[in-house]
């Protein structure tokens, strides 16, 4: 990344796009406190992440940030309900069973709590991952190619769920994607190329996003 300066407004859905090697994953990892930038600063809400030690960063990631990945990152040995409550167990805190049930109902899996990830479809597993990301009431949810392993219909359901989270709760979603259709669910799309900002698009449609992607070299 090189001279990247941008802000993500609270309560919005932002998509990050760019070709392979453009810096999308680096941007996401630095924004989420998974990696530290070699220079510059990252501020989450009112918290400058660069000033925190690893223990403090772990606490921030556990309480104020939610993660949704393409590979789901569920533990096959735990039930769906236990996977959703895992952030509390890792923090050494009691798991709020009512909240787990509420989050599962919110993603359409109210009756799946006692099943195991291996008994679910890909779309259902991704919904479990979203419920786990929401369980602590984070400031922002970072989604890295959340529909990359899903078929078109299931991917659309997951995107509608992410869109609904922003619209209903006012939480913030930042999503890395290569798919113009996925990006069209966002409020705006930020483009990266060669580690630099390469423009922004508000009110995205699949056609507008695809056209901009073909013209990134002009930036």
Image (cartoon, grey):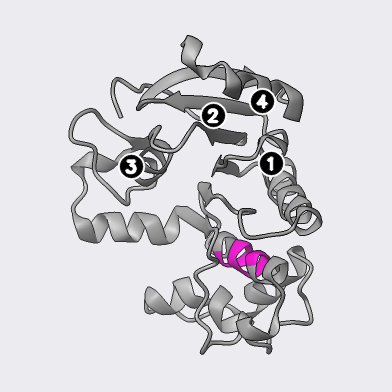
Q: Main secondary structure of the magenta part?
A: helix
Q: Nearer the viewer, mark 2 or mark 4?
A: 4
Left or right of 103, for residue 176: left
The mark found on residue 30 in the picture is 3
Asked if the stretch drawn in magenta spans residue 140, the answer is no
The mark nearer the N terminus, 2 or 1, is 2
The mark nearer the N terminus, 1 or 3, is 3
The mark nearer the N terminus, 2 or 4, is 2
| Highlighted magenta segment, given as a residue range | 126-132
Q: In the image, residue 167 lies at what x, y percent?
A: 74, 41
Q: In the image, residue 86 lies at what x, y percent?
A: 48, 76
Discs 1, 4 touching: Cβ within 8 Å: no
**Residue highlighted by disc 2:** 9
Residues 123 and 33: in front is 123
**Residue highlighted by disc 4:** 209
**Residue highlighted by disc 1:** 182
From this view, report whether residue 82 is shown above or below residue 73: below
What residue is rendered at 58% in x and 34% in y? 14
Q: Say few, some or many: other residues with alpha carbon within 10 Å of mark 2 (under 14 / 14 to 19 / 20 or more).
A: few
Q: Residue furthest top?
A: 218
Q: Nearer the viewer, mark 1 or mark 3?
A: 1
What residue is rendered at 33% in x and 42% in y? 30
Q: Nearer the viewer, mark 2 or mark 3?
A: 3
Label 3 element class? helix
């Amino acid at each position: 990344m090189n001279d990247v300066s941008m802000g993500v407004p609270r309560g919005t859905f932002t998509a990050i796009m760019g070709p392979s090697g453009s810096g999308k994953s680096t941007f996401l990892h630095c924004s989420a406190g998974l990696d530290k930038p070699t220079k510059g600063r990252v501020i989450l809400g009112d918290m400058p992440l660069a000033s925190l030690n690893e223990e403090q960063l772990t606490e921030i990631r556990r309480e104020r940030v939610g993660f949704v990945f393409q590979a789901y990152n569920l533990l096959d040995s735990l039930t769906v309900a236990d996977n959703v409550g895992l952030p509390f167990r890792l923090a050494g805190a009691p798991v709020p069973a009512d909240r787990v049930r509420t989050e599962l109902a919110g993603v359409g899996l109210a009756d799946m709590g006692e099943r195991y990830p291996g008994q679910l479809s890909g779309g259902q597993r991704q919904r479990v991952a979203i419920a786990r990301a929401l369980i602590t009431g984070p400031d922002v949810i970072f989604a890295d190619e959340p529909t990359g392993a899903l078929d078109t219909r299931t991917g659309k359901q997951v995107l509608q769920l992410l869109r609904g989270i922003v619209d209903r709760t006012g939480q913030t979603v930042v999503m890395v994607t290569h798919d113009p259709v996925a990006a069209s669910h966002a409020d705006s799309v930020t483009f990266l190329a060669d580690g630099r900002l390469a423009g922004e698009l508000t009110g995205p449609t699949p056609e507008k996003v695809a056209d901009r992607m073909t013209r990134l070299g002009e930036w």
